[in-house]
């Protein structure tokens, strides 16, 4: 199988907005590297069908226009499936995550530093490499706010990275769910890789979770999805349970707070990184 690669140079502060648009346009994978020019990121989006360049330009135009910038130049080329995987593997190496963990890609032979716990990972086609701010914010909030022996739900588990971290942080039981069957297959392999077989994985979403059953919720989705799911999420949480909501742009935080308040979810903390924020909330509702 071959892929079409679209590369463009974008200012750092709009790279997430641009990545979001490219995903909406059907990019199956996105890769970003810092550019030699300070303040810019080189974004590479991979499409399984050659996309319409004009459609991409039209979708990205308003974001560049808002910033008073000229539209970007798009470079399109064809790559073989194998090249993509191999290229990506070369540039993704082990790294420390949060206070406690050290992510080791399954193809790496890096040694984990003695003061950290290794988290072995191959994200395959799933989201959740640990390099994204939204994942880091969620994990760091869990390190601060999760008490031991909690019943944890990782809603939108992707590669399973947060579910595995929750288990390593002494959760009593951990469940991960995702609407994407590919993510569940990937998460299953990662769970085995970390000998964390007790983690329960399910293809599905919050509506399949029993009322009042979740003691600690990890929820790294998007602001729109979180907004839609909030009532169901609150229903699934135990009284006084804590949830970490991530995948929210700082500009969207207020909206989520406003929707959460009437449901009895009160904000304990807002953590930010770049243009992303994570909201830690307690369920004071029934
Ligand atoms: N938890 C990982 C991955 C987050 S990406 C991390 O923090 O890095 C978000 C994941 O949520 C994707 O795998 C996507 O398939 C899944 N998802 C999207 N909408 C969902 C929904 N309504 N219910 C459950 N999972 C969902």
Image (cartoon, helix red, strand yellow):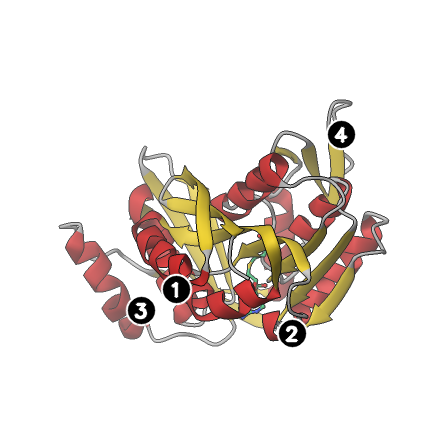
**Position of residue 76 measured from the top left corner of the image (x, y, whole percent):** 39, 63
Which residue is painted at 40% across and 66% down in the image?
224
**Position of residue 258 measured from the top left corner of the image (x, y, whole percent):** 34, 58
Element type at mark 3? helix
Residues tagged 1 and 3 counted as in contact (Cβ below 8 A) = yes
Q: Nearer the viewer, mark 3 or mark 2?
A: 2
Element type at mark 4? loop
Q: Earlier in the sequence, mark 2 or mark 1?
A: 1
**Position of residue 63 measured from the top left corner of the image (x, y, whole percent):** 23, 58
Q: Earlier in the sequence, mark 3 or mark 4?
A: 3
Element type at mark 1? helix
Residues tagged 4 and 1 counted as in contact (Cβ below 8 A) = no
| Badge number at residue 121 | none
Number of marks: 4
Q: Earlier in the sequence, mark 3 or mark 2?
A: 3
Q: Earlier in the sequence, mark 4 or mark 1?
A: 1
Q: Nearer the viewer, mark 2 or mark 1?
A: 2
- The residue wearing badge 4 is 112
Residue count near mark 3 (Cα–Cα under 10 Å), binned few <14, some 14–19, many ≥20: some
- The residue wearing badge 1 is 22
- The residue wearing badge 2 is 204
Q: Nearer the viewer, mark 2 or mark 4?
A: 2
Q: Quadrant of the N terminus?
A: bottom right
Q: Is residue 6 left or right of residue 151?
A: left
Q: Between marks 4 and 1, how big is the CA–CA gap?
A: 35 Å
Q: Is residue 183 left or right of residue 285?
A: right
Q: Between marks 2 and 1, how big is the CA–CA gap?
A: 25 Å
- The residue wearing badge 3 is 56
Within 8 Å: ligand 1 and the Cβ of disc 2?
A: yes
Q: Earlier in the sequence, mark 1 or mark 3?
A: 1
Residue count near mark 4 (Cα–Cα under 10 Å), binned few <14, some 14–19, many ≥20: some
């Amino acid at each position: 199988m071959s892929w079409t690669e679209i590369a463009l140079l974008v200012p750092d502060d709009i790279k997430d907005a641009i990545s979001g648009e490219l995903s909406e346009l059907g990019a199956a994978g996105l890769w970003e590297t810092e550019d030699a020019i300070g303040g810019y990121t080189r974004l590479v989006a991979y499409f399984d069908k050659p996309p319409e360049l004009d459609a991409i330009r039209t979708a990205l135009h308003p974001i560049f226009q808002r910033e008073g910038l000229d539209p970007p130049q798009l470079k399109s080329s064809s790559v073989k499936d194998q090249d993509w995987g191999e290229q990506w593997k070369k540039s993704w190496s082990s790294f420390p995550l949060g206070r406690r963990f050290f992510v080791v890609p399954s193809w790496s032979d890096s040694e984990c530093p003695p003061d950290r716990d290794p988290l072995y990972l191959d994200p395959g086609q799933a989201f959740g490499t640990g390099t994204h701010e939204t994942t880091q914010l969620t994990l760091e909030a869990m390190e601060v706010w999760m008490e031991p022996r909690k019943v944890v739900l990782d809603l939108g588990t992707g590669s399973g990275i947060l579910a595995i971290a929750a288990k390593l942080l002494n959760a009593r039981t951990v469940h991960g769910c995702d609407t994407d069957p590919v993510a569940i297959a990937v998460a299953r392999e990662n769970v085995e890789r970390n000998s964390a077989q007790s983690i329960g994985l399910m293809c599905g979403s919050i509506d399949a979770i029993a009322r009042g059953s979740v003691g600690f919720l990890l929820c790294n989705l998007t602001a729109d999805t979180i907004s839609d799911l909030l009532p169901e999420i609150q229903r699934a949480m135990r009284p006084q349970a804590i949830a970490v909501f991530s995948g929210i742009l700082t500009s969207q935080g207020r909206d989520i707070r406003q929707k959460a308040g009437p449901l009895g979810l009160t904000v304990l903390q807002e953590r930010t990184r770049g243009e992303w924020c994570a909201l830690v909330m307690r369920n004071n509702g029934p």
